[in-house]
Amino acid sequence: MQTVAARPAPRWLRGTLTTVEEWVPAALMGVMAVAITADVIMRYVFNHPLAWAGPLSMFCMVWMVYLGSAAISRRGAHICLDFLSGKLGHRGRALIDLFVEAVTLFVLGTICVATVIYLEKARFLIMPGIGVSKKYITVAALVGLGLMVIHSAVHATRAVAGLRNPAYERVNIPVEEVELDDFDTRFVNVVSDELTGKQG
């Protein structure tokens, strides 16, 4: 039986998601690192701490975590145990993935509702040091959770189609899939041997 490969998302959409979910968090991490470093220098060298550094770092951290979580969800790289699904046929794998995504969507939906309720209260709270309403931190949760809902729904749709596709495999693009040159590979192997107590 012939199977039709899933149609990839448009290039512009993939580029937009990569920018929002990966490059923006990377930029926020840089801003957070600069703010913390500046605060440490001003506090311990000049005895003049920066009141805005802490709140700004927290603001960047929250957005970074939620957008990064969405990126991991899109890649299907959240921690999972595949010892059971790996021994099943394509229907079994698809059914397990469909169940997992259904539970995920329920949990994400519940958290979204709670976040919207909290947003009504957070808009009256002001972050000291930067004078920004805490609603902008809460919005980070809504954006990240909304993106995760979309990605989970896409994975669930693939799982439904996988019930009739013998070649079905769950989307899984782990972060570990990074090309290393020969030196880096040998260095990683040496460190791994040292940590596990092996002798070279």
Image: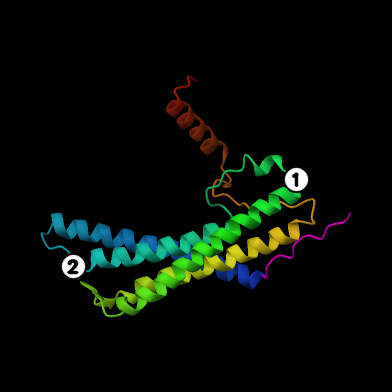
Q: Look at the picture and state if 177 lies above or below 125.
A: above
Q: Is residue 171 left or right of residue 29?
A: right
Q: How crowded is mark 2: few (under 14 residues within 10 Å), some or many (20 or more)?
A: few
In the image, residue 163 above or below residue 85? below
Residue 70: x, y in percent? 51, 62
Residue positioned 35% across, 73% down in the render: 118
> What is the number of callouts on the image?
2
Task: Please identify the quarter of the rendering in which residue 103 is found.
Answer: bottom right
Q: Quadrant of residue 55?
A: bottom left
Q: Determine crowd level at label 1: few under 14, some 14-19, many 20+ residues with C-alpha closer than 10 A.
A: few
Residue segment shown in magenta: 1-10
For the point 37% across and 64% down, which residue is it? Answer: 62
The residue pinned by badge 2 equals: 51
Please report whichever mark, 1 or 2, sits nearer to the chain's N-terminal start. 2
Q: Is residue 171 left or right of residue 122?
A: right
In the rendered view of the protein, which quadrant contains the N terminus?
bottom right
Residue identifier under label 1:
89
Against 186, residue 99 (above or below) is below
User: Is residue 8 on the magenta stretch?
Assistant: yes
In the drawing, does residue 85 fall left or right of residue 141? right
Residue at the far top: name it. Answer: 199
Q: Image point 80% across, 57% down: which residue?
A: 164
Q: Nearer the viewer, residue 49 or 146?
A: 146
In three-dimensional space, the C-alpha distance between marks 1 and 2, rounded to whole angstroms, equals 58 Å
Magenta stretch, overall SS: loop
Q: Which amino acid does label 2 sit on?
A: Ala
